[in-house]
Amino acid sequence: MPVYVWEGKSASGKTVKGEIEAANVQQVYNTLKSQRITPNAKKIVLKSGSLERDIKIPGMGKMKKAKTKDVVIFTRQFATMIDAGLPLVQGIDILGRQHPSPVMKSALMGVKDIVSTGGTLAEGLAKYPKVFDDLYVNMVAAGETGGILDIILERLSVYLEKMDKLKSQVKTALIYPAVVVTAAVIVTSILLIFVIPTFRELFSGFGASLPAATRIVIAMSDALRKYGFIVAVALFIGFKLSINFAVTVRGQQ
């Protein structure tokens, strides 16, 4: 039977650690609960010889990144449920089962399992970084501690909605210049790769010293033909960084 290393809080609030044999993580939770110990969801790992690896709770495999719109819808609905007095586990279960996105459904059902076995909501959300980022998790943790989780979730939904709209506006604004720059790069590349070498052969037959500007263009042609792939990758990375920088700057204004 697998051996699990765990950490949690005793009934007196003292941090306790240990090892336990169990068939799965659910059995670990049940056993510790019967001993009046509240386990920390982040501190349960499966021990294999001298190596340890994080427990993979069902639904926590490789996941795609969730759409911001899906997270906003869940956050708004969850805030309304909490404000109405619905228990956390029940609210997460309802929204998880009804959510049309497979990514959100899988994440929410995993969060429900963690919360229902004694973990906090923030601990459950932290297990899904591709769905709930650090800001989201930390804000939820603050809301749980201060007893204002519904207010925090409502503010989070507004913030996420604004950021999603901002990103959309930045991308839309960059479409035209991106098309112009791309077309210019393609035309210039064609000239440097296919046209300039032809003129180079023609100029070399003159036997005269070429002007500096012509030599520079020929050197650019040679470099592009030799390192064209590297140049293309560098331009792509620069374009992505420019978009991210524009979104960050506008988000801070």
Image: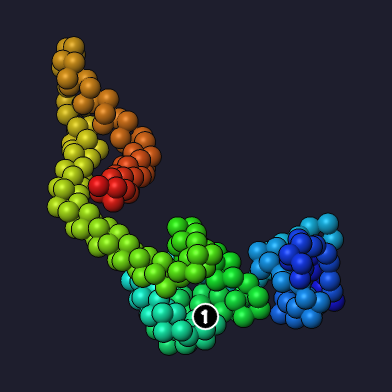
User: Which residue occupies 47% across, 85% down?
Assistant: 86
Count of residue discs? 1
* Picture quadrant where residue 222 is located: top left
The three-letter code of the residue at mark 1 reads Leu
Q: Residue furthest top?
A: 209
Using the rendered image of the protein, determine whether residue 152 is visible from the camera's viewpoint: yes
* Quadrant placement of the N terminus: bottom right
Reply above or below: 149 against 225: below
226 relative position to 211: left or right: right
Q: Nearer the viewer, residue 128 or 65?
A: 128
Residue 48 visible in image: no
Above or below 83: residue 130: above
Which color scheme does this rendered protein use? Answer: rainbow
Residue that numbered label 1 is attached to? 88
Residue at the image point whose x is 38% and y is 80% from the top: 80
Nearer the observer, 81 or 203: 81
Residue 149 is situated, as x and y percent measured from the top left of the image, at 46, 70
Q: Quadrant of residue 158?
A: bottom left
Q: Residue at x 76, y 67 (%)?
A: 12
